[in-house]
Image (spheres, grey):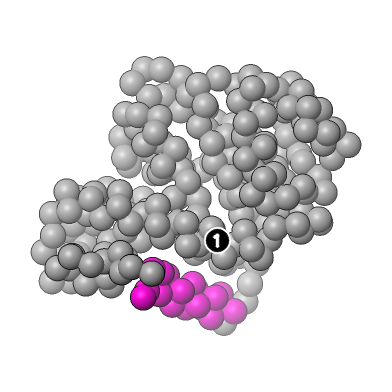
Amino acid sequence: MKNPFSYFKTSPEIIRLAVMLHVRFPLSLRNVEDLLHERGIDVSHETIRYWWNRFGPMFAREIRKHRVRSHKGYRQWQWHLDEVFVKINGKAFYLWRAVDHQGEVLEAFVSKKRDKRAALKFLRKAVKRFGQPKTIVTDKLQSYGAALKDLGLSSCHEFGGRKNNRAENSHQPFRRREKIMQKFRRSSSLQKFASIHASVYNHFNQDRHLNKRQTFKENRSSAMAEWKMLLAV
């Protein structure tokens, strides 16, 4: 494997740190620049933008590979699907999200419409990557039912108001990031960031409220150690 950090004067450790700060926390590029400056690292926010655009998808891909291998075909899965309205240059777009029963974001997909065609494309992408779940919970949007019928998954479908709170709550971290970033200017930028943010969020989400303090600290240290080894050659 070719070293992806070749020809970069900055060390991989600093690049990983900058990308993690920008994606994991609700920080702007200039906020990350200031935090790095506090540590004696002098880089501009445009350099950080370049790093995150170049390495962000690569880091997310590495994380996703590991999780897909460990989760694919897990038949006891319960998926929660929901979509949220996002405005780009005055036009309405929809960010579809699939979340499992443990709160892990499985798939993020951007579309212009909220119809059967968009739902079908979203579901096919998720099922191809992770396999068929035991149950799929949605709201009452009819596009889900029509798409699941075409895929032969109607028997897995459940819908209802409060049943889908898991998916609705998963939009909150993204909404905080959207506000900090002052929204998005292109749908491709939204798709890219949503996918990377989902992978990084999954990697560092340790269910703090469900674990004992010692367990949480061990899991957090393990996640950080794995992050520091991403794309290591």
Q: Quadrant location of the C terminus?
A: bottom left
Q: Where is residue 145, by image quadrant? A: top right
For the point 67% across and 29% down, the residue is: 120
Secondary structure found at label 1: helix
- Residue type at mark 1 is Lys
Q: Is residue 19 above or below residue 215?
A: above
Relative placement, left or right, of 112 versus 30 is: right
Place residue 135 in its image quadrant. Answer: top right
Q: What quarter of the picture does the N terminus occupy?
A: bottom left
As rendered, which of 9 and 30 lies closer to the eye? 9
State how many labels appear. 1
| Place of residue 225 in the rendered image (x, y in percent of width and height, measured from the top left) | 43, 77
Q: Does any portion of residue 224 appear in the rendered image?
A: no
Q: Main secondary structure of the magenta part?
A: helix
Disc 1 target residue: 65
Residue at 51% of width from left, 43% of height from top?
A: 172
Up-down: is 17 above or below 76? Answer: below
- Residue lying at 41% horizontally and 17% vertically, measured from the top left: 91
Q: Which residues are magenta?
A: 215-233
Q: Give percent across and percent down for residue 168.
A: 61, 39
Residue 138: x, y in percent?
73, 34
